[in-house]
Structures are given as structure tokens and as C-alpha cells.
Amino acid sequence: MIRFHKLALGAALVAVLGLIPPSHIGNVAFAATSDMTDAEKKAEEVAATAAAQEILSAATPYAPPEGSSSFAYEAEVSKMLDIVINSLYTNKDIFLRELISNASDALDKIRFLSVTKPELLGETKELEIKVDYDPDNKTLTVRDTGIGMTMDEMVKNLGTVARSGTTNFIKALSESEKNNVNMIGMFGVGFYSTFLVADRVTVASKSNEDDTQHVWESVNGESNFHVGPDPRGNTLGRGTEITLHLKEDADQYLSPYKLKELIRHYSEFVTHPVSLRQIKTVKVPKEEDEFNEDDEPKKDEGDDFEVTEEKVKEKEPEMEEVTTYEYEQINTDPAIWARDKDVITDEEYQEFWQVVSKGDGGQKAEDWTHFTAEGNINFKSILYVPSELPYALQQGQLDQMVNGLRLYVRKVLISDEFDLMPRYLSFVKGVVDSDDLPLNVNRETLQESKIVKIIKKKLVRKAIELIRKMATAPMPEEDEPTEAEIDAEGNSIIPEDKPKKIHPYISWYKKFGLSLKMGCIDDSANRDKLQKLLRFKTSKTDGENDYVSLQEYVDRMKDWQKEIYVFPGESMKALKESSFMDAFIERDVEVIYFTDAIDEYYLGNVREFSGHKFRDITKEGVKFSDEDENVAKRRAKVYAEKFKPLTKYLKKLYGSDVSRVSISKRLGRAPAIVSASEWGNSANMDRIMRAQAWAHKDAPEPHFSSGIMELNPRHPFVIKLLESIPEDEEAEVPESVKDAAWILLDMATMSGGFPIRDPKKYASRMTRVLKSNLGVESLDLAAEIDPPEEDDEPDEPEFDMPDMKEFNMGDLDMEDLDM
């Protein structure tokens, strides 16, 4: 600390007072002489002295360390700060991560070398990182007992912006057959993040290669730095000490709570212990002066009696405040992913799930995988599949879903929300730790790294494999099998009300199935694997938890069946009762029900499974190969010729409400139905699009294409309608026949799942039908009823309640209440 002479302080005070108007000075002087007490005068003098000292400190030019030499940066400082502040780091907190990471690298280096040369550790055996904060001097210090640096290394490694310790170390390992690790512990771009929070940075370092401890120092914004022997001598023994002289707006980094939070967040799993020095003030008994013999009472020479000491009651000791310093290790949790998975218990995995999930996704994980990827890119990872939907997925807010993977580089946290999974696997949580990634680049640059893309690909493959393992796992056995009851004949009695056991994957799939379907749409590379994970309800599944995989469906297809029949709709009940199902029920053909909105998009993007195309039964083109093809063609030809007058007339009558009228080959009980064209939207898709249009009020209502009117040539309604059509095309068709034709279209439209296009005309037609069937001649309203006058009813007699004010329940005799 710089000390000032009293005369200098006095001169500074005069300079300060010279800036104040005389009138104010007079007022101050008057107040000081007339109103202020001695204590207030003393406090005022201290405050003025402190202000003068601060002014002088600010006015004093920067003095480099004694005996140091000046060096120029290889890169312009302005460009350096622009890279650090504007391009690399958007979060100031990152500086502490970089410093601890560099310290960890330096410790790795000395540990590596000490394996073959234990003497390198010398007297400094502990490999550790310590963080100190000094609120009085506004400094933050990070100290390690690593490899340290010589003066030449400090000039080389701290004077070049573009030299990255991480990338150079990776390059050194790749180019050296002997695994040369000389680049570990060298500083790179990450070191300069300290200037985000510091006005001045001081680095002291002691290497085994040099007997002298050196110091490096630079001021934020200057184009040079200073290096020289440390005036303090050898205070480190070995290692590096970085002291940040914090900016005015960086006081939060002097808070032990803030520092503990940052260390735990970024360096929770660093291999070496990271400790934070805690400053505590405690009260201890004040030390008393030693006993003075002169204070002992003396006996007068003339006294014949002895003075006896009375037992004096001990007084409570006087207390004084003492400042203590002690280090607390912050990163006490081991990196579970770096341990051998064979020695990790399920309880430990579930405990770590609580760390990575933060309570979002269920109290326990459904399953997990712990693996090490080796090859061109090496990394370790633990991936978890949650047991419950994360909150964002529960609310249907996929865009708000936060990616659940933490990315580490050599156990140093890079991001706790890194985008390593596609959106359909955003529910997967866990950690990824790679030694091949650079530390000192921003998140956006890292996202585009080729290494990250390779890691992504492997992670997706592992996540899908984990879900496949869940799907193919055998049904778990009951924890406590119950003893079966035996009847009189010795047979086991099976309880009728015993619920059917549900496979754990079905319970999980009912929550996460939509995400897997999204993956089939988005991820074409893994589509085949994902489709095998899907489960569906079909026309042959009755139970609430009965589901069928696509592979199971294919395995039990009819011998003549070539396509996978699917039926998209709004509900299971509506699909089962639909006229589209008649022909399939008659032939005992299984149909997959698509009741999720995403199923329509899945069907539009995924055309087949295992070589079998999907066939939407609500669209044209449905054919059955269970009968002779030649007979089917000849029958279709006869029906088309017979009903040609009717189909021609109906197309003319309906106009643009239908795209065409045809004779159906698949209808059973229904007289007619409206289906969609093979490449058009189904009725269910039209419903979804209408809902989306209504949800966005400003969006125009979508235009829906006309459907195909399919007639059942065997139905009496259709046959009767054919007979009602005049043979002469120019003849007038009775209105009753027209109404019947329109009602037939209305029925077919609703049976096909489409809405009535013109409800007003539909109501008019139904009114005419009711009028005719009921024999009503006119729709004029009848005259209003004139009700007769009724006699007034007599009033009910009044009943006066007795006065209960003087009534007391305690006066009642219980015998009076006996019935």
C-alpha cells in the first residue's frame, strides 16, 4: 500500500476545498465550529483524509513492479480486448472458469512429470488450487501448485493473444510419439478474460527450471506488459499465482457466496481440490496481563493477624473480535462419469440424476447408459431417460424445452444447456466430458465444431439404443409373488379382478411417444430405428394398455396383404364405429389407429415401414387382394356401366362440392361415403388445419379440397335413387329426388369425417323432408294461446314464533325428552 506524507495529504485537501464555492466553504466552516461535536469533527477529518488519499491514488501514475522489464504485446491490445469482450465471452463470470481450468492443466503437467521424477514435487507435495479474495484491497487471487513458468515462458505465453494452451497441447500430443505434454498449463486466450473484470492483472510464478520467482503484470488497455523478478522473493515454492485488481463494477466477485457459486457451477468436478479462503470474524477471550506481585496485599509489621485471601467470584472474561482465515474445499463431489461403471451402484446413478435433472423429469430416472466413446474423438458420457415428462413438454411448449446435457471439457463445465441432442430427444439429460474440445471459444463457435457434430451423432445413436433396450427388456418379475389359492379339486384360482401387468416401456411410451414420432419426421438417418420403437392402438387391441409395434403388425398381416392399413381420426370410439372399417372387419384385417395430431404429419413424411407402404383407409385406392383379380375387374366394370346415369347426374347436381362420384369396392353397410383423394388431405387433416386456423385469428381460413363421393352399389338407397332418375337427361328431376340425393351426400360427408359445407342449406333440406314425412301443409305458426284467468289462491295462515329469549337448554329435564 502506498503511504502519503501529512503535508501531501494537506495539499490534496486544500486542492479539494479549492473546488468548492466560497459560500459553501463558509457554511461548512460555520457548521464545523458551531454545531459539530468533537467526535463528529474527528470523523469529518478522517473522511476528508480518506478522500484526499483516494484522489492522490487516482492521480498517481501506474508504477510497474520493481526491477521489471517492459515488453510489447504481439497483438494490439485494442484488438485483444475486442476479441475477448465482443467475440469470445458474453458472460463475465467465465473468467473464473478459465483461470481454474488453466490451473488444473498446470497441476496435470506436474503430476504427469512426477510419475517418473518424484523429486519434482519437492517440498510442495499438495496439488491444489486456492482462491482468495481481499475486500479491503479489492483483489481476487487464484493460486495453484502446478508446473509454474520461467521468465521466458511468461513472456512467451502471456504476451501472445493467439497462443491457445488447449489447442497447442492437443496439437503437441497428436504430433508427438512420446506424448509430449509440454503445452499443458500454458495460458492462451482464456487468460485474457480476466480483463473483463480487472483493471490490472499480476501473475507470479515459480518453476522448477528457475531458482527465481518472477512476476508478470499488465494494465487493462495498455499495449505492453512488464516481467521481472518478484520483489517478494520465493513465496510460492512452485506454481502460479494470479491476482486480479478488480474494476469498480466487479465488487460481486469479492462475495464468498458468489465465488462459491461460480466455483461449484463451473469446476464442481475438477480432479484437483479447489478451495476458497473464508474470512470469518469470531469473538475470543481477551488476553489479560500477567499477575503483578506488587498488587499482592502486604502485611504490616505491627499486625499480629494474618490476612486470609477471600474467594473472589470469577468475572466473565472480556471478549475481543479476531479475524480468522480458513480454506473450504468446494468441489467435493467426484466426477461419477470418470469412474468405472462396474463399481457404481444404482443408488449413486439415481443421486446423480437429481443433480442433472434439477427435479424436472421425475424423482427417479427411467433408465440410463454410461459409456466411453473411443476412436478419432474420445469422450465419456452418462445419458438419462426421465420417468416423467419435463414441465415444458407437459405444457406442450416444445420451443421452451431446455436442452438437458451438460458439456464438460476435462471436467470443466462449458455449458449446462448445450445443444447436443435434436429436439425430439430434448428430454434426455446427462453429461458429456471430452478431452478433444477447445475451452476458450464461445458457445456459438463450439456449436459449429466438427468435433461437436461427431459427438452429437454418437450421442443420438446411444440414446436411441438406450430406448431400444427399454422397449425390448423382458417383463419384470413381481417383487413379492402371491401364493395362488387352490380349490377343492387342487386347481389354482385366478382372481378375476387382478389387473393385467403393464410393461414399463408402455407406461413410458404413453408419455414420450409423441417425441419419438417427431424423431421419425425430423431424423431421416435414424428413421428405421425410431419406427421400431413406436407403439400403436389397432382394431384388434382392446385394453387400455394394449399396444402393437409396427413389426408385430407386419408379422401378423394376411398372406395376401401388401400394405399397412392406417386410420387417422380424432378418437378411438369414432374410428371403431366408422363405415370405413366395415370391409376390414368383414375380412378380419387389422387396422392401425392414428389418434394423435402428429400422426398425420408422420404419415405424410414416412411412407413405409420394412418395405410395406402405409395406406390411409380414408382415401381412395384401397384394394383387397383376397379375391380373384379378374372377377373383381369384371364386376367393377358391370357396376360402373349400370350406375353411370346416377354418377353422371349426381356429379352435375353436386358441382364443386365433390371432385367426382364413383362406385365403391369396399363399402359394407353404408350407402355412400366421402373419401379423400390419394394425394390430398384426409378429413382428419382438414380438422387439424381448421383448428390451427381458428387458433390464429389473424390467419386466413384454409381452403379445403373436395372429396370423392363413393356409392355402395348394393345398398337399397343407391339402387332406389338410380331408379328415380329419368332416363331422359333433359327431363326435370323431382325435388324429392334432389333432396334425397343431397341428404345422401350429407350422410356420406359426415360418415367420411368431413363437416357439412353449407349448414343453412342442410337445415332447409331437412325441413322439407320433415314437412313431407309429417304431412304438414304449411309452416305458418299457429296463433298464440290465450290462457284463461285463474282465481287467486288464498294466502297461507301466518304462524307466530314464540319468544325464545328466556329459553335455556339447561332447564330441560332429560326425562321430558324420553319418547
Image (spheres, rainbow, N blue to C red):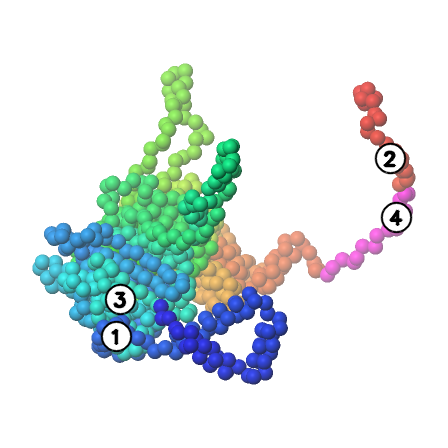
Dot 1: few (<14), some (14–19), or many (≥20) neighbours within 10 Å?
many
Dot 4: few (<14), some (14–19), or many (≥20) neighbours within 10 Å?
few
* Placement of the N terminus among the 4 image quadrants: bottom left
Q: Amino acid at mark 1?
A: Phe
Which SS class for mark 4?
loop
Which residue occupies 59% across, 80% down? 26
* Place of residue 453 in the rendered image (x, y in percent of width and height, measured from the top left): 25, 62
Q: Which residues are magenta?
A: 780-795
Which residue occupies 21% across, 53% down? 124
Query: In this rendering, would 378 be left or right of 557?
Result: left
Q: Which mark is residue 804?
A: 2
Query: In this rendering, would 94 be left or right of 9?
Result: left
Dot 3: few (<14), some (14–19), or many (≥20) neighbours within 10 Å?
many
Chain-order first, disc 1 or disc 2: 1
Chain-order first, disc 4 or disc 1: 1
Relative vertical location of residue 223 with respect to residue 373 in this rendering, above or below:
below
> Which residue corresponds to mark 1?
225
Query: In this rendering, would 759 be left or right of 499?
Result: right
Mark toward the viewer: 4 or 1: 1
Q: Which mark is residue 790?
A: 4
Between residue 414 and residue 385, name the one nearer to us. 414
How far separated are the C-alphas under marks 4 and 1?
112 Å
Chain-order first, disc 3 or disc 4: 3
- Please tell me whether the stretch drawn in magenta is mainly helix, strand or loop: loop
* Placement of the C terminus among the 4 image quadrants: top right
How far separated are the C-alphas under marks 3 and 1?
11 Å
> Which residue corresponds to mark 3?
203
Disc 3 and disc 2 in contact, CB within 8 angstroms: no
Mark toward the viewer: 4 or 2: 2
Residue 781 magenta:
yes
